[in-house]
Amino acid sequence: MSKDNGKNPMPNNNGKNPMPNDYGKGLMFNAFPNLRGSRLSGANLRAPPSLITQPGAFSSTNSGQPFASSPQSFARPNIKKPDLEYLGYLLGLMTCPTRYSEFHSYLERIDTYETDHKKKMLFTIGSILTTNHFTFVDLATHQYGSQALKTLLKRNPSLIDRFIYEAVCINFSVLMNSKYSHNLIVDVIRAVDKFKKESLYELTYINALFLAEQETGCIALNNVFQEIKGKFRELIFGLVALNADRLAFDPYGTHVVQNFVTLKNPRATRAIAVTLFGSFFRLAMERQGSYLVEKCLKSDQGREIVLIEFRKNDREWVRMASHRYGNFVTQCALLVMKERGMKAMLREFVEKLRPHFGSMEIGHGKNTLKVIEEKIEDYLLELPYNLLGFMH
């Protein structure tokens, strides 16, 4: 009963956390006290001006074509001619698909040098590739250039701390928004010290909402978030929770909200559900939105809030049961209530549908009807365990 044949990039690792008994929008601000007040844009937290990248400054990706421009067009005016020629040579090796293996051979040849000479050569490569940030961005976002850069950094991780970190900070949102370079951010986070990690965490927070609404940025944000620890992890959780009602209806932002609901952070999951309260029916009748509602239903912190909305509107509940996407959410809600032993509430929801069983036999409603007939009706007829003794 799949809603589509595409791959949903969201993991499905819902936590088994107890659900708090309190309810209300104040809970979100108790969970994330620094969110009180107006809606956040990550820029409320200051970062060093030189590290703040303006979204959309560069194109997101480069194809596998070798660089068409000469290295002179990227270099600083005072760069020496021999360095320009060497830069052109390196870019040719690193970005041309037919010469990509030559770059590996070149690095293997450097490996045969004496330690000091080898170190000097690798540092020269790292320095010249980051001399100009346009050059570095074009290389890092290039299909083959990004692979060559990764190979280089594996051979000498110290280049990350010495050269790559600064270039990544200055071009952070551009690199995060490229399908070829966003994994570089993860490599850099893992390689640098705690202070530099914090700067990268902060840049992720500052750019979080922008990235969440980009085709590649939403994937990059989810991947990089796995590396983030401490206060910035909580800040990003809170930022997404506070803006969940906007992100949930965005074609890319929805993937971020779906992912965050499954990350076993009880406060964040409940805060997201509180923000979405009043929108669950609307979300359930959209393809990606229906996935999000199902994830909320399967979470211990979001289930109660979703069911409260469903319980308050009989008309929408009936309509959803026969909707193209909504019927999957209806099935999920019924099965979750059964699994959680919520028999009284389950019976209530089934009875609301019963007068419409005839019309549900046509169209998508038949999927809901099949689940009720095969998995729900017999369960509702079972006697409670403590009454079975009276049958003998």
Image (tube, grey):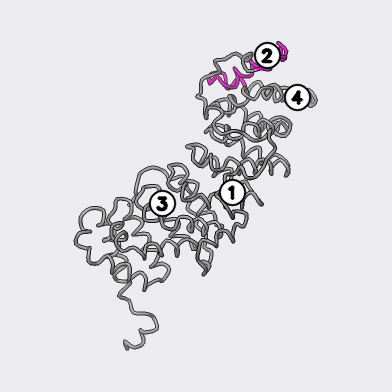
Q: Earlier in the sequence, mark 4 or mark 2?
A: 2
Label 4–label 2 contact, CB within 8 A: no
Q: Amino acid at mark 3?
A: Tyr
- Image position, residue 339 (x, y; %): 41, 67
Q: Residues within 10 Å of mark 2 (few under 14, many from 20)?
A: some
Query: How far is disc 1 from disc 3 in space, using C-alphas?
Result: 22 Å
Query: How far is disc 4 from disc 3 in space, using C-alphas?
Result: 52 Å
Q: Which residue is mark 1?
A: 236
Q: Which residues are magenta?
A: 75-103
Q: Which residue is mark 2?
A: 84
- Residue plotted at (26% across, 61% down): 369
Q: Earlier in the sequence, mark 1 or mark 2?
A: 2
Query: How far is disc 4 from disc 2 in space, using C-alphas?
Result: 21 Å
Say the numbered circle drawn on residue 118: 4
Q: Which residue is mark 3?
A: 291
Helix, strand or loop at label 3? It is helix
Say the numbered circle drawn on residue 34: none
- Image position, residue 97 (x, y; %): 53, 21
Magenta: main secondary structure: helix
Q: Amino acid at mark 4?
A: Lys
Helix, strand or loop at label 2? It is helix
Helix, strand or loop at label 4? It is helix
